[in-house]
Image (cartoon, rainbow, N blue to C red):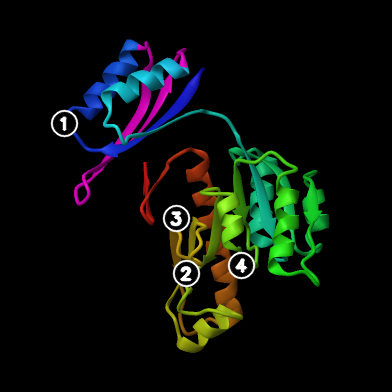
Amino acid sequence: MNEHRLLIQTNDTQGLVYNISKILFEQNLNIESNSEYVDNETNEFFMRSVITGEFAQKDLLRKLKDILPVNAIIQLTKKAKKDIIILATKEMYCLGDLLIKHEAGDLDANITAVISNRDSLKNLVEKFNIPFEYVTHEELSREEHEDLLIKAIKKYDYELIVLAKYMRILTPNFVKTFPKQVLNIHHSFLPAFIGANPYKQAHSRGVKIIGATSHWVTNVLDEGPIIAQDITRVDHTYSWEDMRDAGRNVEKVVLSNALDLVLKDKVFVYGNKTVIL
């Protein structure tokens, strides 16, 4: 089945859904599923359609542009596994979760490589027959290390870069090199509990909720558009180690869920937030 995902973002005007559907009908395409949302505060329209059938892509896009407002953003992608590269440091719980899902065929992606600034994860990654690259940062400036990292990434096929607890702050040059392609996971304690061992800090404050957030990476640290979040409840009986373990479980679930949404082309970025359809 020739299945595509059509994503449209534009100013809301009367008859948008009808006009788009009419074009698809005239192209002998079938709408398998359809979701729409209008932000009433900004009058912004979002639509995601899963369509099947044979068509000429350039012709369809031209016809859609003719009936949509001039500022419309149209994305048309064929259903297929996306190539991803994972960056990691030494924590293995998020990485391991993705590697197992990939091995089981439960990840709608091809992991083309795992790249790390430490070599401690090499044995784990190679058990899954996935290339592992160690890019040292010792005795290098951040810029020098990132130059090597960018060269390593560009050796492989990729559409998306996933930070699976990659514990390095990325520079604006890196973000510019891979715009809207870098997905991150972090504890929702940030920025309330920053620096070393946020779980110890949270334990000392007696927190009752532990969370995690997955977001797109931007030049503003940990403030990119949020894709997925979740929490788990804790209480006074938890040690900081218990909190850490509970937090790790949430982190790997949130990262996996966010990645799944991105791989299925369900995420629209709008300003500094997202719309999920």
Q: CA distance from mark 1 to mark 4?
A: 45 Å
Q: Residues within 10 Å of mark 3 (few under 14, many from 20)?
A: many
Q: CA distance from mark 2 to mark 3?
A: 11 Å
Q: Which residue is mark 1?
A: 14
Earlier along the polypeptide chain: callout 1 or callout 3? 1
Q: Quadrant of residue 199?
A: bottom right
Mark closer to the observer (2, 4)? 4
Earlier along the polypeptide chain: callout 2 or callout 1? 1
Q: Secondary structure at mark 3?
A: strand
Compared to residue 67, the image places residue 230 above or below, namely below
Earlier along the polypeptide chain: callout 2 or callout 3? 2
Q: Which residue is mark 2?
A: 188
In the image shown, does 269 or 21 lie closer to the viewer? 269
Q: CA distance from mark 2 to mark 1?
A: 40 Å
Q: Quadrant of the C terminus?
A: top left
Q: Which residue is mark 4?
A: 169
The secondary structure that dominates the magenta segment is strand
Q: CA distance from mark 3 to mark 4?
A: 21 Å
- Residue drawn at (49%, 38%), measured in percent from left and top? 264
- Residue drawn at (24%, 22%), measured in percent from left and top? 19
Q: Secondary structure at mark 4?
A: loop
Earlier along the polypeptide chain: callout 1 or callout 4? 1
Amino acid under label 3? Ala
Earlier along the polypeptide chain: callout 3 or callout 4? 4
